[in-house]
Image (cartoon, helix red, strand yellow):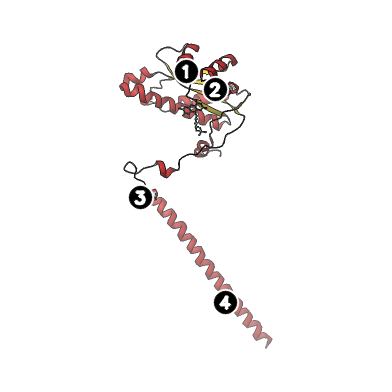
Amino acid sequence: MEGDILDLIKSRRTITKFLPKYVSWEKISRILDAARHAPSCGNVQNWKFLVVFEPEQKEQVAAAAYEQYEIINASVLIIVCAEPDKAERYYGLRGERLYTVQNCAAAIQNMLLEAQSLGLGTRWIGAFDEEAIKSMFKIPIEARPQAIIAVGYPAEVPQKPPKYPIETIVYFHQWRLRIRDPAKYMHDTATILMRKSAAMQESMQKTAKSAVDKLKEKAQIIKQKISEKSEE
Ligand SMILES: Cc1cc2nc3c(=O)[nH]c(=O)nc-3n(C[C@H](O)[C@H](O)[C@H](O)COP(=O)(O)O)c2cc1C
């Protein structure tokens, strides 16, 4: 698994149950570092990350997250807050409403993947009472909590929920236009040649093997004939 980002992406699960185990600050800081390297519109980085690890505060957050009390066992809760005004200044309504959410989502996904790479589990929580969280942490009016990320050691890793197969979610050139063999359609010569060379290699191996078998057969016949002659 090590080194392969796709394996990491695929193996990440939303963890519902955490072990009551402490996660080192070194690991938490790596997760936060991953967040700040995420892409953002015009690189505005209009996000803030509120780190919560006091048990009473975690309890209050869990209550505000409509009683998702399992997160209390997570070592840390990271409240991801957006600063929509900063994006609005450059990109208007689109910046405020759309880019801001996307910026935070990119930072969140970076955190989830870094946590996964460190052997930790995460739970992305979007369901919470925004006003309750704001007043709990004295979050100013211009900032908006987007998500609570629970980070800890998983008590169990749930089964992978079904994900749509690639061909049902990918269209080509036009909405709903599906192609059976995307590589062929996209004139991906490298893929086509690779497939062809694999097929060619296989057929060549077969031909070579049958030639060798035939030669062996012939050699056997000759050998037999020689031994018959010497017996005469
Ligand atoms: C925007 C958003 C909000 C979510 N809110 C919650 C939540 O409040 N509680 C929770 O347990 N999981 C929440 N999740 C996690 C999803 O339930 C989870 O990603 C989904 O079931 C797929 O499972 P997977 O993450 O293991 O692939 C949220 C995920 C996203 C992206």
Q: Amino acid at mark 2?
A: Gln
Q: Is residue 1 above or below residue 44?
A: below
Alpha carbons under labels 3 and 2: distance apart = 47 Å
Q: Is residue 59 left or right of residue 104?
A: right
Does any portion of residue 37 appear in the rendered image?
A: no
First-in-chain label (4 vs 3): 3
Does any portion of residue 32 appear in the rendered image?
A: yes
Asked whether the residues under the numbered discs 2 and 4 touch, taking CB atoms below 8 Å apart as contact, a structural biologist would say no
Mark 3 or 1: in front is: 1
First-in-chain label (2 vs 4): 2
Residue beneath disc 1: 129
Asked whether the residues under the numbered discs 4 and 3 touch, taking CB atoms below 8 Å apart as contact, a structural biologist would say no
Kind of element beneath mark 2: loop
Q: Amino acid at mark 4?
A: Lys
The tally of labels here is 4
Q: Amino acid at mark 3?
A: Tyr
Residue beneath disc 4: 218
Kind of element beneath mark 3: helix
Alpha carbons under labels 2 and 4: distance apart = 78 Å
Q: Residue at x 32, y 22 (%)?
A: 93
First-in-chain label (3 vs 1): 1
Residue beneath disc 3: 185
Q: Amino acid at mark 1?
A: Asp
Q: Residue at x 55, y 32 (%)?
A: 117
Position in image of residue 22 (x %, y %): 62, 22
Alpha carbons under labels 1 and 2: distance apart = 12 Å
Residue beneath disc 2: 68
Q: Is residue 48 above or below residue 165?
A: above
